[in-house]
Image: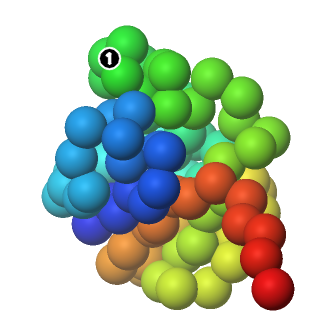
Amino acid sequence: MKLVYFAWVRERIGRPEETVELPAEVATVADLVRWLKQRGEEYAYAFENEGVVRAAVDRVHAKPDTPLSGAAEVAFFPPMTGG
């Protein structure tokens, strides 16, 4: 699965994207975030406040309970404002 990171999430992790093979127990966006946080301090720092970081699964905004089955890409980004 391709993971893409934007804005300060990218800065904290130190890379714009990566391809990973998910363990079988990672079934939802929330599971993915928990798994990523265990991969190192840069991930733990990026996702320290899980309620702030937003996700999109295959370019569609997703909630934490969104299933990942069949997904090709998950993007993570901070909330955005603007006009």
Compared across the picture, whether 78 is left or right of 23 comes to right
- Residue drawn 50% across the image and 32% down it: 46
Within 10 Å of the Cα at label 1, are there few (<14), some (14-19), or many (20+) other Cα atoms?
Answer: few
Question: Which of these two is toward me, 28 or 11?
Answer: 11
Q: Which of the 4 quarters of the picture holds residue 74?
A: bottom left
Question: Which of these two is toward me, 26 or 79?
Answer: 79
Compared across the picture, whether 67 is left or right of 73 comes to right
- Residue drawn 52% across the image and 85% down it: 59
Compared across the picture, whether 78 is left or right of 10 comes to right
Name the image colouring: rainbow
- Residue 40 against residue 72 in the figure, above or below: above
Any part of residue 25 in sight:
yes
- Residue drawn 37% across the image and 48% down it: 10
Counting from the top left corner in percent of width and height, residue 17 is at: 24, 58
Counting from the top left corner in percent of width and height, residue 33 is at: 55, 39
- Residue 81 against residue 24 in the figure, above or below: below
Question: Which of these two is toward me, 44 or 66?
Answer: 44
- Residue drawn 47% across the image and 66% down it: 75
> Residue under circle 1?
40
Compared across the picture, whether 8 is left or right of 18 comes to right
Quadrant of the snapshot with the C terminus: bottom right
Please identify the residue farthest to the front as the structure is shown. 83
Counting from the top left corner in percent of width and height, residue 62 is at: 70, 71
Quadrant of the snapshot with the N terminus: bottom left
Q: Which of the 4 quarters of the picture holds residue 6?
A: bottom left
**SS under mark 1:** loop
Counting from the top left corner in percent of width and height, residue 11 is at: 36, 41
Q: Amino acid at mark 1?
A: Gly
- Residue 72 against residue 24 in the figure, above or below: below
Question: Which of these two is toward me, 27 or 12?
Answer: 12
Any part of residue 66 in sight:
no
